[in-house]
Every structure is written in structure tokens, then in C-alpha cells.
Image (cartoon, grey):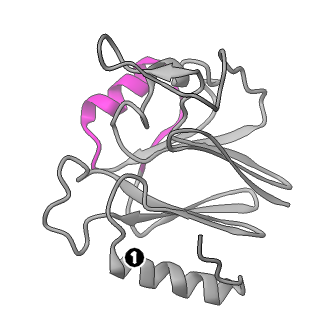
Amino acid sequence: MFQVTSLASQTWLVRSELAVILIDPILGPAYGNGPRLYQFSSGPKGSFAFPDEIAAVFLTHEHEDHFHLQSLSLIDRCVPVYLSEFSSSAAFTILKEMGFKNVFQLRAGHSVHVKDLRFQAYSTNLGFSNVGDEWDALAFSVIGKGYFYSNVDCPIDPQVLFKVSGQVANEGFEKVAV
């Protein structure tokens, strides 16, 4: 089994036979403060309390729709959290102060194995000089009995796309254009 579910914005829940990982969690119907309150017309309603099945959380960067403190507060503090190595020291400190016991740096070009899933991180600015404030974002793929890729908030980098295409071919997956 390989199942990818969009919960909201760039929030992804990936399930396999042995693992469940959560990427950029927004676990409520809205995010933002004051006049910048964003609400979802579909997606999560109310608050979520995930059981112990969440094996890992991945945060691609520090923007509020990816690094959402209210949602992170709903996650068991024993769940490992992975955050881009380019994130601020404040982001790592906040996670530790929230009580997360296992907070790790996630480096572009490296992967993390979570049971039968592999989370592969990519740099999003290899071929771009103008990435705005997305300099710390990590594109990613999740590989199991299926393959899922997201460039997150950044332009698609041709070098990353070439790597992803190679991985898809090497893993024996059929390419699907959406």
C-alpha cells in the first residue's frame, strides 16, 4: 500500500503498510493571524489528534503554512521532526522548547528512511538565482511502493526534475503527468 492524502495547503499524509509520515502539517481549518487569516474551503475541519501511528514529521521550511505551531502542538512529542538544515536556529529552538525529543536537520541530497518509506530531500534553488524568501525550502519525494514528489513553493528546478525522473525509472515506477 502507498497512499498520499492532501490535508490542506501543502500538508501531506503519506501511508504505507508500515509507516505514516506527516509533511508540513496544518491540522485545522485555518492558519494565520489578524488580517492574514487563511481559511480552507475544503480540507481539515476542527482539530486533529493523530494516534501513535505518525512515525515522523517533515517540515520543508519555516513559512507559517509549513511550520504551523498550533498544528505541531497536536503531535506527540516522541515523534521525530525533520527540518531543513537551512532553517533558523530559532526554529530548532522552538521545536525543542515545545518538547519534541528528536529534532533533526534535513539536508538536501540526503534521505531519511522511516520503516518502508524513504523521504528524499532536494535543494530548491540549484539553478535559480531568484527564489525570493524560499531559500530554505526543500523539495522532496517520498518513495515506497509508490512515488510522490513536491517542489513545495518553489519553481521546478530542471536539475531536480532530472534526478526525480531518474529515481522514478530506477525504482521501476511508471511516469504519470498530472
State the residue in front, 68 or 97: 68
| Residue for point 14% across, 61% down | 130
In the picture, the quarter occupied by the C terminus is bottom right
Q: Where is residue 125 in the image (x, y as percent from the top left)?
A: 25, 65
Q: Position of residue 101 (x, y in %)?
A: 54, 29
Dot 1, crowdedness within 10 Å: few (<14), some or many (≥20)? many
Q: Quadrant of residue 55?
A: top right
Whether residue 85 is visible here, answered yes or no, is yes
State the residue in front, 80 or 46: 46
Whether residue 99 is visible here, answered yes or no, is no
Vertical position of residue 121 compared to residue 98: above or below: below
Q: Residue furthest top?
A: 34
State the residue in front, 120 or 68: 68
| Residue for point 38% across, 20% down | 32
The magenta stretch spans residue 95 = yes
Q: Which residue lies furthest to the front in this view?
A: 41
Vertical position of residue 53 compared to residue 104: above or below: above
Q: Is 13 situated left or right of 107 in this image?
A: right
Q: Is 68 situated left or right of 49 in this image?
A: left
What range of the chain is rendered magenta? 86-105
Q: What residue type is labelled 1?
A: Val
Q: Quadrant of residue 75?
A: top right
In the picture, the quarter occupied by the N terminus is bottom right
SS of the residue under disc 1: helix
Residue highlighted by disc 1:
160
| Residue for point 66% across, 20% down | 45
Q: Where is residue 70 in the image (x, y as percent from the top left)?
A: 49, 17
Q: Position of residue 84 (x, y in %)?
A: 37, 49
